[in-house]
Image: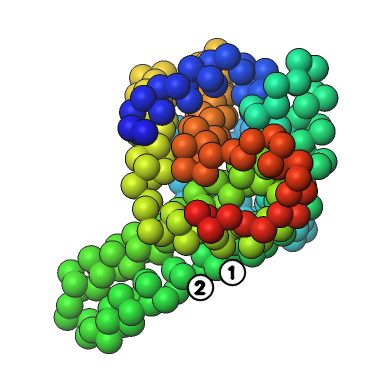
Amino acid sequence: MRPIPVTFRALRRTYRAPRLVLLLWGAHLMIAGVAAYPVLRHLDRMLAHAPAGDELLERLSLPLVADLLRAGGDWVMVLGPLLALVALLTLLWNVFAAGGALETLLSGDPSRIAHRFGRGAGRFFGRFLRMGLAALPTALLAAAILAGPVFGVRGSLDDNAEGAKYWLGLAGAGIALFVLLLVLLALDLARVRVARDDVRHGVRLFFATLRAVLRRPGRVLALWGLLALLFAGISALYLVLRQILPAAGGAPLFALFLAQQLVMIARAGMRVALWSGEIALVDQRWPEAPLAERLAAGPRAPIPPSA
């Protein structure tokens, strides 16, 4: 199965699921609003009548941000727990949304999307959460094992080798990020298999899928890379628009906000497309057993050797 046709089919499937894309976008917007609203209120109170506020609209100014943090008083003490809460809500929502989205994409049930999404999210939340908790230390350990020697060599160099230290730092970070990506893609594929086949032992299936991905990572990496390249192009168009429109006045700011939200909608669409493509890859690599065989085996059947 070639990655380019799989990617196009995944994009077509995403185009036919606009309500799922908007549901994912709206949920992330609400979670971001938990932190954005109090931060914007604080910035408005501090900078509404200050010339430095115009500078912050045009570009991020680290000295200005540092001054705001020093002058924030008690508000700064609330910012850390607030960001931690948003991070926790985002992680839990991602687990919840994975079950809901996969149930929506896999199920042939003609019921409303809210019913299918909620059914899948509640049904698979516990299994997907345990799989994620198993994947996190696995990814960190694998990244430390593979990227650790590179950082060790970098740390052993003296201060005269600035160029070598710079490139070794980039190489170590690249290796670590690549390992994390492989583990996350394996987690995605394992979740697809759990949702499709209603597998109970999700953690075992994750490790079996991870071994298969490490042996043959090409197709899932190509799928992810094509979608990432497409999203990078969309983001580049937004950055060009941001350079063209002046960050002054209500109308340009509102236009930039709308353009930013269109980028976020595209990001949600890329996520749905990735799930759709991964479903196709799972169906090709681990074909679903016939219905009679699955009923006879039961929900706790052992993982097949082909995994």
Along the viewing direction, whichever of 195 and 131 lies nearer the viewer? 195
Position of 111 relative to 45 (above/below): above
Mark number, residue 141: 2
Marks 2 & 1, CB-CB < 8 Å contact: yes
Query: In screen coordinates, is 55 left or right of 29?
Result: left
**Quadrant in which the N terminus appears:** top left
Label 2 and label 1: CA atoms lie apart by 6 Å
Q: Residues within 10 Å of mark 2 (few under 14, many from 20)?
A: some
Query: In screen coordinates, is 89 left or right of 256?
Result: right
Q: Residues within 10 Å of mark 1 (few under 14, many from 20)?
A: few
Please state which amino acid type lies under the numbered disc 1: Pro
Can you see residue 79?
Answer: no
Where residue 150 appears, as percent x and y from the top left, is 30, 75
Q: Residue at x 81, y 32 (%)?
A: 118
Q: Identify the element where label 2 is drawn.
A: helix
Q: Residue at x 51, y 73 (%)?
A: 141
Q: Which residue is mark 1?
A: 137
Q: Residue at x 46, y 70 (%)?
A: 142
Please state which amino acid type lies under the numbered disc 2: Leu
Position of 25 relative to 164 (above/below): above
Position of 92 relative to 165 (above/below): above
Where residue 83 appears, as percent x and y from the top left, is 69, 52
Can you see residue 181?
Answer: yes
